[in-house]
Amino acid sequence: MESQDVYRELSKKLMMENSRVMPLIWRTVCTEEEAAIVNRMPATVEELSAAFSKSSEEMQATIDGLFHRGVAFDFVRDGVTYYRGPRHIVQFHDATILWKEAPEEMFRLWEEFEETDYPQLLELVTTLKLPSFMRVIPIGETIQARNQVLAYEDALSMLESSSAIAVTTCVCRKLMKRCDKPQEVCLQLNRGAEYTIKRGTGRKVSMDEALDILKQAREAGLVHMTENTGGKSNVICNCCNCCCEMLRFATAEKMKGVLSPSRYRALVDADACSGCGLCEEICPVEAIAIEADVAAVKAEACIGCGLCGSVCPVTAVTLVEVRPREHIPAK
């Protein structure tokens, strides 16, 4: 397989077959032979050694390098360790950007990709009504009826049920650099935590520190997000609307399918509202505004994050359930 073909083949596996930039990104992280090895995955070290006429020691060293760069991932099946490439474009993006020795050219190409080819993928996701990549986690304290909250849409419950917790740098703010909001706030859970600790791109944190990180994120006006499935999650992202690879596209009609709102929507008690405007200032999607000295919610724009309610000094804004449990896809 010619070099350009193998980089194109890897791009195809990420639904980016026609991207001009994606093969160039692959080229910055893999040699031609390494790209062919990733393309041959999933496989064991022994299978790859036989396929590429290398010793097991040589192949393991190559795979270790690919793991370090964020393009090879290990998993165990029936007691045997296998390696695979990235499952999707988001995983490839996030893992490679945390590669500490990455060349500046890679970052430049990722930024170019996000402004050119990536929106086309999001339009496809939205048009075909494919499952959103991520969904919003509501701030539980702002929900009107707390007994309706599911365990996998409550940040505290997600943390409490996790086998491990780690924190990493926010890859979106590291790449885009469009704001000064805190960067070390991306919480990895369960297998996600184990992966980033093993790779050395994150550090293990206690429950108390994780709760402090959530508090810091809320105070900075960051939105909690997780994978768009029910059951155990591997991440709680804390995102801004200027850098985030999800949130900054959530208000565009043709691309908003990338992010699923929570099951909730903001509701204003007009009699209690003081018209202070704090909710309008913090809303990441401009879904709430002061009209005639009272906050008003644009129902179709609200993503149900609860930031508005978290800053309301008179508790006039709460979240109410507007979508069924089936809104969150099964694991």
Image (cartoon, grey):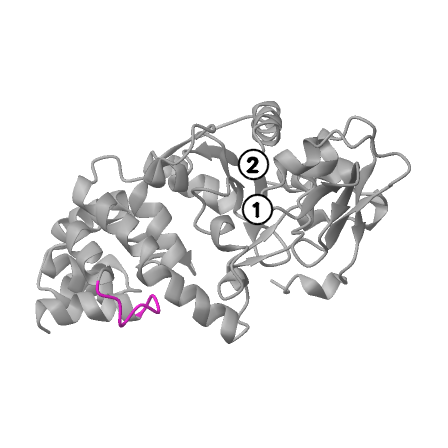
As helix, strand or loop, the secondary structure at mark 2 comes to: loop
- Seen from the viewer's position, the closer of residues 223 and 33 is 223
Image point 51% across, 76% down: which residue? 128
Residue topped by disc 1: 225
Residue 87, visible in the rendered structure:
no
C-beta proximity under 8 Å, tags 2 and 1: no
Residue topped by disc 2: 222
Start and end of the magenta stretch?
13-20
6 sits to left or right of 293: left
Q: Amino acid at mark 2?
A: Leu
Q: Amino acid at mark 1?
A: Met
Tell me the quadrant of the picture where the C terminus can be found.
Answer: bottom right
Quadrant of the image occupied by residue 172: top left
Q: Is residue 19 magenta?
A: yes
Label 2 – label 1 distance at C-alpha: 9 Å
262 sits to left or right of 90: right
